[in-house]
Amino acid sequence: MVRFTDIDEMAAAKLADLAARDLRRDLVDTCAAEGSSGPHVVRDGVSMISFCSNDYLGLAQDKRLAAAAQTAIETFGTGAGASRLVAGELPLNWQLEQALAAHKGLPAARVFGSGYLANIGTIPVLAGPGDVIVMDELAHSCMHAGARLSGADVRLFAHNQADAAARCLVDRDDFRHALVLTETIFSMDGDAAPLAALGDVAETTQSWLMSDDAHGLGDSGDNPAIVQMGTLSKSAGSYGGYVCGPGHFIDLLTSRARSFVYTTGLPPAVLAASLAAIGIIEAEPWRAEKAREHAAHFAAAFSLPAPDAAIVPLIVGDAQTALALSAHLAQQGFLVPAIRPPTVPVGTARLRVTFSATHKSDNVDALIRAIKNAPFEIAQAGAHKS
Ligand SMILES: *Cc1c(COP(=O)(O)O)cnc(C)c1O
């Protein structure tokens, strides 16, 4: 074991090791192109069309969100100044919570600093030592983190297999509470969870189902989950996280979710932008439809299964080919990063292609042509579909 006395020497050695394993990550400036209300970005000084944003509805550059944010800054200033429980409780918080609860059709909602904070704060309130958490193996990193923080027994079930979730609960009686966790739309595969079947599992085993709708398009339909979390930083084009559920439970979060209690409330501008976004999502359903339509058109061009939302994985196999294809597309002005292990399983390196309401059909067709004409063998295995 090498022991370092100098912190930066330690960091340099770890970075070198990450680089040797192709795991080092670095930041690249990527800004919306000036005056763009759509997917045009400038990355490291080069203009590109982005096919990797989670701004599925194209709201992050919407002037109405910006105007709402500006008004909030003029009225309330730039910072909340304190935890919501101390003195940071702006009325915009509960206005947003009421809008979210109504939008989801659930009794109550609480807004958190981010989706990540919502999951790591909420899961330990639902389950603890003596309880069991059963979660989809592909669930997001912050659900894993929340599950680990809870101290409950954690079990993973095969992706989207409700019967596998049920098998994890055969010894249900050995535990006090049981919590089943899933995403609604999976971030790297774009497929939808079998929510109705998972709802049945939860009901027959007297468990609670909690869903993470981070990649939903704001119109996720019937969801039997009693606790539904999501983010305001993807489809809503703003920032922050939320949890919707029964009234007393939401009140319990206010007292017990550590990532709610011990952190500062969101800035006024962010809350106002989110509130404006909910109104637009409800008034303009064409946005979600458009994003879905682009994704379906792209998937059909590669004979892939029809996608459930606005994410289509183009699985190319090995990491090097994925990187080379991504670089090839970048040269032609398309930003589609390669996603490699360990983010996805070995042998399934892919381009994760995402679509937005603000893409034009011409943009999508141009990307399809560029991929078809690329000098690479694409070992498309098809997204995992059960
Ligand atoms: C992005 C994401 C989160 C975290 O949301 P943030 O608001 O970005 O912190 C949580 N869950 C899933 C599935 C996500 O993709």
Image (spheres, grey):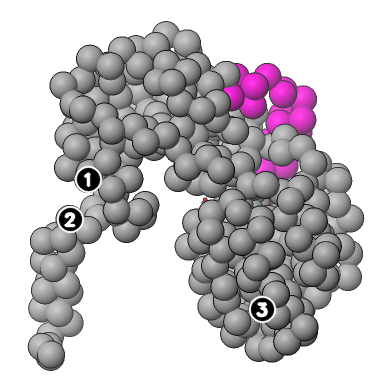
Q: Residue at x 31, y 12 (%)?
A: 369
Residue 37 locus on image (x, y percent): 49, 22
Tell me which numbered mark, 3 or 1, is placed earlier along the sequence. 3
Q: Is residue 34 above or below residue 139?
A: above
Helix, strand, or loop for circle 1? Answer: helix
Name the residue type under label 3.
Val
Q: Could you tell me if the residues under marks 1 and 2 are in contact, i.e. CB atoms within 8 Å?
A: yes
Which residue in the structure is indicated by mark 3? 132
Chain part drawn in magenta = 271-292
Residue 284 locus on image (x, y percent): 72, 23
Name the residue type under label 1.
Ala
37 sits to left or right of 379: right
Tell me which numbered mark, 1 or 2, is placed earlier along the sequence. 2
The part of the image, by quadrant, that contains residue 293 is top right
Q: Is residue 275 above or below residue 261?
A: above
Residue 276 locus on image (x, y percent): 71, 36
Q: Residue at x 50, y 46 (%)?
A: 187
Numbered disc in front, either 1 or 2: 1
Which residue in the structure is indicated by mark 2? 22
Whole-number angstrom distance, CA of label 1 to CA of label 2: 9 Å
Whole-number angstrom distance, CA of label 3 to CA of label 1: 36 Å
Which residue in the structure is indicated by mark 1? 319
- Label count reads 3
Whole-number angstrom distance, CA of label 3 to CA of label 2: 36 Å
In the picture, the quarter occupied by the C terminus is top right
In this view, the residue in front, 36 or 294, is: 294
Name the residue type under label 2.
Asp
